[in-house]
Image (spheres, helix red, strand yellow):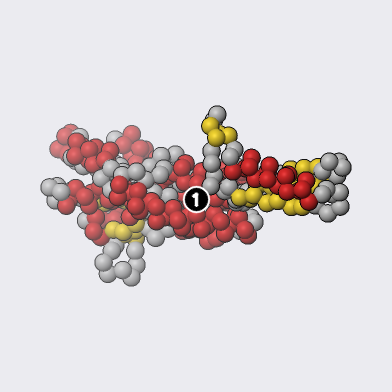
Amino acid sequence: MGNRNRTLMETLGEPQATKKDTETGERERPGHLQRRDDHLSELVSGRYQDKVLLLVDPQRCRPWAHHNRRYDLLDEQRCADLIESFKAQGKQEFPAIVRRLEGDPDRDYEVICGARRLWTVRWLRANHYPDFRFLIEVRELTDEEAFRLADVENRDRVDISDYERALDYRHALERYYRTQEEMAKRLEVSPGWLSRYLSLGELPKEIIEAYPQVTEVRVQHARVLKPLLRSAEMRKRVLARAQELVHEQGQQGKEGGARDGQAVVRELVRAARPPQRRRAASATEIPSAAGKPMLRVAAKGRGGLVLEILPGNGAALAELREACARVLGEHFHKPQGGKIVDRQ
């Protein structure tokens, strides 16, 4: 066989000849040939996939532009488990899934699955482990296939925030699918489950920026906040409060007392409520000796008082003066807690 076939056999696990075979020049036993034929049949039928694994310089790789994880949010804390695992094993155990790049002089591969592994190897090389290399598996994938593969790998991971996942789904719906129903079917999730994430991805950026960290934006928050944005007046109040929170978060962050995500939601819900108007104090009517309404008395502001002399009351001037003096006396010398308070 030629070199190409020899390479294929080595990849498929070509059995080594026994000492007896080598020394006598005998042909391989039928069992070995049968196993080789089985491998070839599986490869042709698609039941066996030949995987290309490479160890490469991580600087020759970049995250896929549509990766569902924000690479800029990765740090030692979010990659601590991988850092310790790689150091303990002395290598990367599981390969990242990549595609070959064309037309990029600085990069050879884009990472579809394995952004944290890429970050970890780069970090190790910069921190006393310069010989670490990045283990990759090269595949040919369409963008839609790449999206679904990344989603399946990371769907249950708690270190990807709900908002990262929500944006990923919203962008995927725009790029790859005609309807939410089609997308849900391809992802094998319920339409309702997908709809909740899409709603989260539609929240205005002003609201997202009000959170101390994007990782604190939860999918259930959209269910509370989206109804507050339907009315123009409510939306205006909510977004205005969100902008205030951005400034307050900066100040509180310096002092170590920033609000958490749930507190942000409570503030925005409170802001959506219309400002309560102060109820005017109920007026009191004082009748004249003739039994007709003579004076209407109402409190106004802090310590203020309004006296209104009602027409047709049938009272004489002396009676009016006496009634007004009595009301004023009670108002300016009103008892509080058993004491007489002079308001003058």
The answer to whether residue 212 is seen in the rendering is yes
Q: Using the rendered view, name the quadrant where residue 331 is placed.
A: top right
In the image shown, does 249 or 113 lie closer to the viewer? 249
Q: Residues within 10 Å of mark 1 (few under 14, many from 20)?
A: many
Q: How many marks?
A: 1
In-image side of 82 versus 148 (left or right):
left
Residue depicted at x 33% and y 34%: 31
x and y, in percent, of residue 267 in the image: 50, 46
The residue tagged 1 is 166
The answer to whether residue 169 is seen in the rendering is no
Residue that sits furthest to the top in the current view = 338
In-image side of 307 versus 205 (left or right):
right
Residue depicted at x 78% and y 51%: 317
Residue depicted at x 30% and y 50%: 254
Q: Amino acid at mark 1?
A: Ala
Residue depicted at x 34% and y 52%: 251
x and y, in percent, of residue 152 in the image: 46, 44
x and y, in percent, of residue 200 in the image: 53, 50
User: Please, is residue 107 above or below residue 93 in the view?
Assistant: below
Secondary structure under the numbered disc 1 in the rendered image? helix
Q: Using the rendered view, name the quadrant where residue 3 is placed.
A: bottom left
Residue that sits furthest to the front in the current view = 318
x and y, in percent, of residue 18 in the image: 20, 34
In the image shown, does 59 or 201 lie closer to the viewer? 201
Residue that sits furthest to the left in the current view = 128
